[in-house]
Image: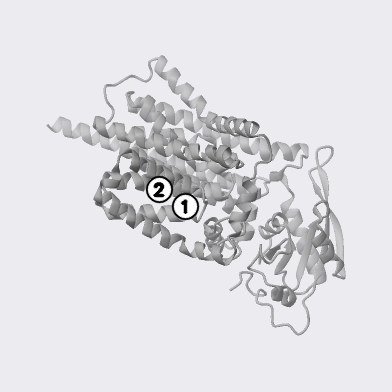
Amino acid sequence: MTRSINKDKLSFIETMKDELRLFTFFAVYLIAWTLCAQFLPTASELDSTEQVVWSQSWQWGYYKHPPLPSLLLCVLNALFDGPSKGLNAFAAQGCNILALFYVWLLAKQMLSRKLAIVAVLITSLIAYHNFRAFSFNHNTVSLPFTAAAFYYFYRALQVPERLLNWFLLGLVCGLALLTKYSILLVIASFFILLLWYRLFKNIPVMLGLLLSIAVFLVVISPHVYWLAENNWRPFHYLQDKLTVSGNIASILFGFIATQLIRLSFAVPTLIGIWVFIKTGRISKVELNSGNSPDQASFDRHFLWIILFTPLTLALLQLFLLGSELNSNWISAFFLPSGILLTVIFFKDWDSTQLLKRVSLLTWITQAVILIFFFVFAVIYPSQVGSASRLTFPSQALANKVAEIWRSQQQTPLTIMITDYWSGGTVSLYMRPEPMVLIDNSIEKSPWVTEQDVQACGALILVNQAEMTEDFKLLLDQVAIKGEFILPWGYAPKGKDLHYLWAIKTSEPNQIACRLSQNTSPD
């Protein structure tokens, strides 16, 4: 008996060490991506820059998307004294790590604790959960809320009498919808599973489901109210984005090919596992899980349904509605794939040996992904002078804007009238950060009013290559103006950006500029 107790104790200690190694992996991963983004000569990614602009003000919706990613970044910027490249990367990859944490919680419900870690490590190798998570956008921020929804739905079905799980399910689904509307495809998979197992006749399940729906509706209600007040603007944008602009067959082929490429990042590790199995370094065992056959069957059905229902519905939109498909929109749908692979292929192999090999392969692969990403997206383009997005001279642009404003005005720059890329880029470096009036549109930028422009003045900045009639008319109305050239890379791969600028001075007899002391509007 004593020997058995000591063996169980040693096994528990070994498992705890394995889980500590998993959290060490999370920490090292997050720190490495954050530091590389902050200290290498990178510009902020395109979507991240847009979020910098949107996060300047607390809104319940934006003209393109729901509000939660921008609200989260708004809080982080307030805590860390404004936006930065490193903070953007930290926020994005932090969402990715939190999603993998929930994948781990779900995997532990179906697998042994060691195999649960294997499932998480395999999941982390899918492109959406490493270099594609570098951008702080709605796809990346949807990852943790979708993963949490999978977990709480599973837990709610296991113990339907426990209302806390149903409450949390409604909460995370509501937060997921405030992040990205595509969560509705995931929620559809929940209802299909309920139908599959005829759980609508189960009273505890139905009561819990009603609680989830009530919480979900409460969470999304401020955004729904905003939508009604603003003519459902994100849906107009979504309708434009979903309009098919090419041959359906070519769109489908490109979509599937892109998914296979992004899934293929896990293939080297899977091949490595196969080699270890074939060479006898991973041995087979009779049973690695204490789950009953019925529970194991339910787990497989659960994983298949929540994985393939959203993907199938996304594809059906193309055929039934003629909708466009963007490969990034389904980022969160592959979260259960690592668990499913482990359940199908690795459940009967020695978990200790398997985890040891998978851990080694994952560390190597993640290091290679990190190095290759920054070498080929940042360092190599910088060395050859290429005008790539991540080598945009963002610091130089911000310095030039600050120099122009100081030479013409005595007060701090509080408003920029420009596109979101230029405005967000400047806001990353200038303190206090100026509010951005996107494309001179109050509808796109409700945090700035016409009275603000009249009281505070503004700097108008436009790339000559992207000049519109609206900007041309605006520049014609202003007396103080000029232009400058901003080198982006160098010959023969670089180019020069020709910027036009103008200063709209504050008008007399106006109230004091409410943005002069604090760039965030009340």
- 33 over 472 or under it: above or below: above
Q: Secondary structure at mark 2?
A: helix
Sequence-wise first label, 2 or 1: 2
Is 460 left or right of 116, judged from the image as shown? right
Percent of width and height locating residue 446:
64, 67
Q: Nearer the viewer, residue 504 or 18?
A: 504
Percent of width and height locating residue 295:
27, 34
- Residue visible at 76% across and 42% down in the picture: 387
Whether tag 2 and tag 1 are in contact, CB under 8 A, the answer is yes
Q: Nearer the viewer, residue 138 or 205?
A: 205
Which residue lies most toward the bottom here?
509
Q: Secondary structure at mark 1?
A: helix
The residue under label 2 is: 149
Q: Is residue 152 visible?
A: yes
Identify residue type, mark 1: Ala
Is 502 left or right of 272, judged from the image as shown? right
Image quadrant assignment for residue 325 = top right
Percent of width and height locating residue 406:
78, 68
